[in-house]
Image (cartoon, rainbow, N blue to C red):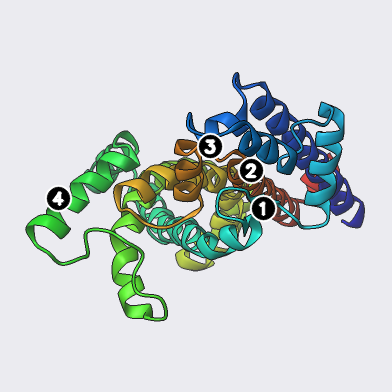
């Protein structure tokens, strides 16, 4: 198990470093002088020269890359050259909103999708199975941003049950929870459909296996067979999908944060792109890549913990 964990850790570190090099190369390949773009057409030559010096744009590209990787290794994401603020502090201020939204959406999707899929498998080919299949496909078909707009119009504009926008008053957990409900549901619906379909097919495969038939022949209660012998095997592919799903959810939070004007990492990166604030874009994306890689690492480790064959692969 230790060798398996070390191999996955090394692979994750290599992935993060490779992604940072690619990110740095892409941002530096964008046409135009970042200092001129950020300062605008009224900037003087002295202002542009000062900005270029602060951003190390006069240095060779390899020197810039080395400084960038070295700063990230020390936990320094740089400084917002427009507002003279630490990018790490700026990210730390908004990251909880994104993490709560993404993790909450996954948990909500699992809480609804797993029993929904198991229920559909238990009543296979019945009218309940067909209703569950229809709902699952409907949830998968509707993109999160469309679901977000529909929920916003129905429950915020028409019924006025929930706030239209924002992340809630700082320190007021009840107000923050009210602001979280609609974005959470909008982001989770698609994954409810995916997980329900995945669990249904996995449960049906597990039910047909010999060890499950043996457990039944011993006279074990149906509930014990389902939870001890069926769901354990059925959850393995779901764990792997959830690891990738968390990364996709982080991407999906960008549109949801825009629709609900919710502060978060995606909203911060979007505003930085609009103002051509490349250091903030760079720092925000580094954190996003790190979170995506860590989510996949946790999925891999969980996958290996549940299925010993994965550890030997």
Where residue 132 appears, x then y in whole percent? 28, 46
* Label 1–label 2 contact, CB within 8 A: yes
Say which residue label 4 marks. Answer: 153
Nearest the viewer among 198 and 42 is 42
The answer to which quarter of the image holds residue 164 is bottom left
Q: Which residue is found at the position 34% from the left and 42% from the top?
A: 144
Q: CA distance from mark 1 to mark 2?
A: 7 Å
Disc 1 is placed on an element classified as strand
Nearest the viewer among 75 and 7 is 75
Left or right: residue 122 versus residue 80 is: left
Counting every numbered tag in the picture gives: 4
The nearer-to-camera label among 2 and 4 is 2
Q: CA distance from mark 4 to mark 1?
A: 39 Å
Disc 3 is placed on an element classified as helix
Q: CA distance from mark 2 to mark 4?
A: 36 Å
Say which residue label 3 marks. Answer: 39
Where residue 248 appears, x then y in whole percent? 51, 41
Say which residue label 1 marks. Answer: 79
Q: CA distance from mark 4 to mark 3?
A: 39 Å
């Amino acid at each position: 198990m230790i060798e398996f964990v070390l191999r996955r850790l090394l692979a994750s570190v290599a992935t993060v470093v490779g992604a940072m090099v690619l990110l740095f190369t892409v941002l530096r390949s964008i046409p135009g002088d970042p200092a001129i773009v950020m300062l605008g057409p009224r900037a003087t030559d002295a202002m542009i020269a000062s900005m270029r010096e602060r951003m190390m744009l006069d240095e060779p590209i390899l020197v810039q890359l080395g400084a960038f990787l070295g700063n990230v290794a020390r936990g320094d994401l740089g400084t917002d050259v427009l507002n003279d603020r630490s990018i790490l502090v700026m990210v730390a201020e908004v990251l909880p909103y994104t993490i709560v939204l993404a993790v909450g959406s996954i948990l909500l999707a699992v809480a609804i999708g797993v029993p929904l899929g198991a229920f559909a498998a238990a009543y296979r080919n019945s009218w309940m199975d067909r209703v569950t299949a229809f709902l699952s496909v409907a949830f998968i078909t509707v993109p999160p941003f469309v679901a977000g707009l529909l929920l916003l119009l129905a429950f915020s504009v028409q019924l006025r049950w929930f706030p239209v926008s924002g992340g809630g008053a700082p320190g007021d957990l009840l107000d923050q929870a009210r602001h979280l409900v609609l974005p959470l549901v909008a982001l989770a619906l698609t994954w409810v459909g995916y997980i329900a379909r995945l669990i249904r097919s996995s449960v049906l495969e597990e039910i047909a296996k010999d060890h499950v038939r043996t457990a039944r022949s011993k006279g074990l209660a149906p509930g014990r067979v389902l939870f001890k012998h069926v769901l354990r095997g059925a959850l393995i592919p779901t764990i792997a999908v959830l690891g990738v799903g968390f990364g996709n959810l982080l991407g999906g939070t960008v549109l949801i944060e825009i629709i609900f004007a919710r502060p978060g990492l995606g909203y911060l990166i979007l505003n930085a792109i609009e103002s051509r604030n490349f250091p903030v874009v760079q720092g925000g994306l580094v954190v996003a890549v790190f979170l995506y890689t860590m989510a996949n690492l946790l999925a891999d480790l969980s996958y290996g913990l549940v299925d010993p064959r994965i550890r030997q692969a």
